[in-house]
Image: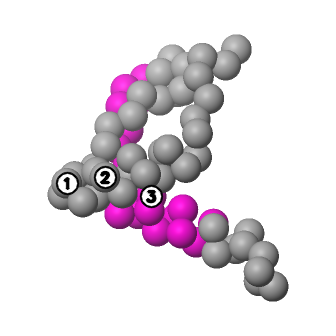
Amino acid sequence: MVVAELNSIAFIEWLIQCFKSDVKVMAVDPKREDQEKGLRISTLNIESQLEHAGDHIFLVANRDF
């Protein structure tokens, strides 16, 4: 069951806004199966997420563009 879909561009814009606002980490709820194993909340580093997004964009970019 899909509860919500994430718009990649909106997510990256939100990450950039967080980064510019000096937010260092964000807390996220784990998947249901991880919750059942006892995992409660995870944190993601904003800067690392932006680096990962940039790396992915670079990898899939059309180099002839």
* Residue 63 seen anywhere in this rendered image of the structure: yes
Task: Depth check: give the residue in front, 41 or 63.
Answer: 63
Question: What numbered label is drawn on residue 49?
Answer: 3
Which range of residues does the magenta coloring cover?
37-56
Is residue 22 within the magenta segment?
no
Seen at 58% across and 72% down, the residue is 55
Q: Is there CB contact under 8 Å for labels 1 and 2?
A: yes
The quadrant where residue 50 appears:
bottom left
Residue picked out by circle 1: 21
Q: Secondary structure at mark 1?
A: loop
The number of numbered badges drawn on the structure is 3
Task: Depth check: give the residue in front, 6 or 39.
Answer: 6
Question: What numbered label is drawn on residue 17?
Answer: 2
Q: CA distance from mark 2 to mark 3?
A: 13 Å
Is residue 43 within the magenta segment?
yes
Tell me the crowding category of disc 1: few under 14, some 14 to 19, or many 20 or more residues within 10 angstroms, Cα based.
few
Question: Left or right of 39: which side holds 2?
Answer: right
Position in image of residue 39 (x %, y %): 42, 28
The quadrant where residue 22 appears:
bottom left
Tell me the crowding category of disc 3: few under 14, some 14 to 19, or many 20 or more residues within 10 angstroms, Cα based.
some
